[in-house]
Amino acid sequence: MREVFPEGARVGVLTAQPLGHVLDYLAPEGGCGLGDYVEVPLGPRRVMGVVWGPGEGSFDAAKLRRVGRVLDAVPMREEMRAFLTRAADYTLTPLSLMLRLATRTPGLGEAPGALRVYRRGEGQPERMTVPRERVLEVLEAFGGLSFTLSELATEAGVSTGVVKGLVPSGAVLEEDQPRDRPYPRLDPARPGKALAGDQAEAAQALCAGLASGAYGTTLLKGVTGSGKTEVYLEAVAECLRQGRQALVLLPEIALTAEFLTRVEARFGARPAEWHSGVTSVERRRLWRMAGEGGAQLVVGARSALFLPFQDLGLIVVDEEHDSSYKQEEGVLYNARDMAVLRASLCSAQVVLASATPSLESWANADAGKYARLDLSSRFGTATLPEMQAIDMRAEETAPGRWISPALEAAVRARLGASRQSLLFLNRRGYAPLTVCRACGHMIGCEHCDARMVEHRFQRRLVCHQCGESRPIPEACPSCGVEGKLVPVGPGVERLAEEAVALFPEARVAVLSSDLFGSARALKAQIEAIAGGEADIIIGTQLVAKGHNFPLLTLVGVIDADLGLQGSDLRAAERTFQLMRQVAGRAGRGSERGLALLQTYQPEHPVIRAILTGDEEGFWRAEAEERRAAGVPPYGRMAGIILSAPEARPAFDLGTWLARNDGALRRVGAQVFGPAPAPVARIRGRHRVRLLVKAPKGVPLQAAISDWIAPVKLPPNLRLAVDIDPQSFM
């Protein structure tokens, strides 16, 4: 039974404001309870907070202010408070920032009431104009979701009058609806696809784990196309039968459209969605329904992990190896690891699904911390693709061309058979460098130590670090000579240009995240490709993530060596994962696929492992190297990132920290640095990094807290701690 505080009692309230601690208030008229969402005065403002416990008691009660009101929302459960506290302790993040992640939803303090919303109707306006067309396009792109008037007008870039003008014709429906409605019920009794062999055994094992009612984590490892989704949907069905809620995390918004369709076919209704492409009306509705039990299944991005579920019984992390699960700005956390933490606190099951799991998950399964289920064959009649290398040292490829004669011939064969080909290059834009042939100047970003990338489709140079863009200049910014700027190296746009020249009769589609104005537009393109509306697909790593193109029988990797350079300890692992994932796009229908890897290093151990398919051999060799070096997952690491408008203060603080590392040495940790970050300046701020390395099992967070505690940061100097860093940029 939760603790209740009578009127006038001293209560501790945690707000999402950057204060770093709980504040004392007096309970309002009628009192309040532990976990209640409340509105409290803070200076001249009123802010939202959560009753975190009894007040501290040291502040003069006569000076305490009273809680303004208790909000009409289900109180935060003890499990959620424990999760936020443990996550804050693990990531060394102020608890207030963790609360912000859990309450970043508009209108939480508003009364339930009714809300006037607008959605697509069946009518058509008598007179179509460009602004009206934009409104209808937005409504159709969002698949029937409702908008507020201002939200729809903003999304379409029109005035509110344009929206209202579409109502009389029935093209847009204007309705008053309950502000927060439960989602349609999903029916777990509906039959799923017939599973056989190891798929059926894996589904039974996952359902048995759910039936136990206890916490457990399972690594579901299956080759691409092996039916991992159908297997874990059986676990979702079992979770729903028990009356508990389920959460499925996906690494990309672009994956949700196909997945939602599969869920609807399996359970007879669409689940709730949570990601940046969802309207604010739906975000508020889902936040409240998750807490009230009105949302049985949520499909979302990593932030969905912070929804206030009433009774969470299952978390699925699909493509668990994907780097996008690591939040790299603000609160630095890995959603895969936080999913395991949250499940352990609410007696839920976790399914980590991947064809190429992270070494961390593989090692935990190898050590017996996680259960492991393997799916070794493709679902139905599909078979794994054949893997071959194209030795670029033996190919006579013309200068300025990147598609080898061997790959060109393979694409032509697919065109003749009315099948699709995918040309993969993990590099956005047209060219990674723009160089002046007169003086050798390489155009860089004015705000970052990074080269500007030419995006010819947009006719602009773009910095992929800060997003700064500018028109492609006619003259060199350094020497002023005109006509001497040339692109160097290929990006997907340049590869598409080459494909159009080589195969003029083919329909070429480019899949790159920066070429689409919205997530919905990207989803539409993916659906069109799956429907056969392209012959050749040019794509970045976006295409490697779970898409199903039935007509795709050839994958050509343009530069299989691209990820093997550099000092990133995960370079080999990421290259292996990416190549295996993208190769797995081929032959997911009835025909066997072929994957061709263009490489200058066919004898490289990673390339050989990719070609032979000896995944377990690769993981064991990689694990032994990491164990010998004492690095994750067989050791611990933390990154310290210092940034300032000038480099000197950041280096001075870094040097002081390196010299005063006694708190770290006491637990056996080492400090490396300070050193400039690989990209030493981003958005005008100079960046300095230190790397902390420690044996596995030591209290690293406590040692780092003691180490940085004496630091008093001046206003312009920032210090961020990244526990278990995934990127070293």
Image (spheres, rainbow, N blue to C red):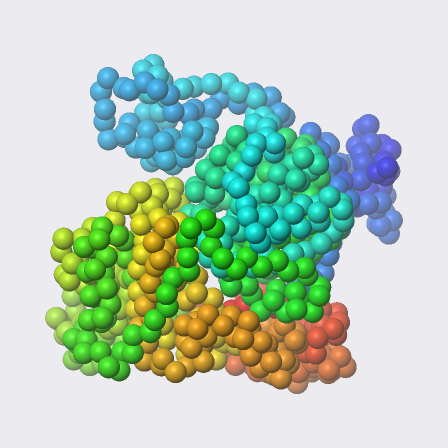
* Residue 466 percent location from the top left of the image: 40, 62
Q: Going by the image, does 246 lie left or right of 556?
A: right
The residue drawn where x is 43% and y is 24% is 118
The quadrant of the picture occupied by the N terminus is top right
The one of 707 and 717 positioned closer to us in this rendering = 707
The residue drawn where x is 43% and y is 19% is 174
User: Can residue 50 be seen?
Assistant: no
Extreme-top residue of the structure: 168
* Residue 378 percent location from the top left of the image: 47, 55
* Residue 491 percent location from the top left of the image: 28, 65
Q: Going by the image, does 198 lie left or right of 131?
A: right
* Residue 196 percent location from the top left of the image: 55, 48
The image quadrant of residue 669 is bottom right
The residue drawn where x is 51% and y is 70% is 615
The image quadrant of residue 497 is bottom left
The one of 627 and 480 positioned closer to us in this rendering = 627
Instruction: Give the answer, above or below, for where 345 lies relative to 93.
Output: above
Instruction: Give the answer, above or below, for where 669 lies relative to 246.
Output: below
Instruction: Give the answer, above or below, for where 192 lies relative to 399.
Output: above
User: Can residue 379 be seen?
Assistant: yes
The residue drawn where x is 24% and y is 17% is 126
The one of 437 and 354 positioned closer to us in this rendering = 354
